[in-house]
Amino acid sequence: LGTNFTMEQDFYRGRLTDKHGLDVLVPSPEDRQIIHRIIYDELVLGEVRESSRQAYLTIMDKLRNQGAEAIIEGCTEIVLLVQQQHTDIPLFDTTAIHAEAAVVMAVPHD
């Protein structure tokens, strides 16, 4: 899940498919618009609405019903709205994943 650009462009999907052999599911065009609107009209302004959380959870359930085994939170603001405590489908917070990778690369280890 992320902005329209993130969900519609092949940069991320292509890398996950080509480099890692993953099947990437993307929400329907209507659901992508809902996700995008909530990010820009609410989350970037610091607004976290329960109705929006429910909308995201509904979209995530649709993806699970299509075969999704996990959800990628591909936008920094999404974690303000949906955390692992809200669902039993595994969530991958890309901001946290990138931060952890940066620390591993920056910190020398034997």
Image (tube, helix red, strand yellow):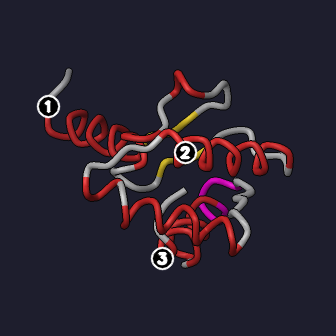
Residue found 62% across the figure and 28% down from its top: 87
In the image, residue 45 sits, relative to residue 36, either above or below, namely: above
Element marked by disc 1: loop
How packed mark 2 is, by other alpha carbons closer than 10 Å (few <14, some 14-19, many 20 or more), is: few
User: Is residue 59 toward the left or the right of residue 77 in the image?
Assistant: right
Q: Which mark is residue 5?
A: 3
Q: Is 29 a magenta residue?
A: no
Residue found 68% across the figure and 46% down from its top: 60
Q: Main secondary structure of the magenta part?
A: helix
Look at the image and give the residue range highlighted in magenta: 17-21
Q: Which mark is residue 26?
A: none
Q: Position of residue 55 (x, y in %)?
A: 62, 49
**Going from the N terminus, do you reach mark 2 or mark 3 first?**
3
Q: Position of residue 97 (x, y in %)?
A: 37, 40
Residue bearing mark 1: 107
Residue 9, picture quadrant: bottom right
Residue found 47% across the figure and 68% down from its top: 37
Residue bearing mark 2: 51
User: Who is closer to the viewer here, 72 or 107?
Assistant: 72
Residue found 66% across the figure and 39% down from its top: 70
Q: Position of residue 83 (x, y in %)?
A: 47, 31
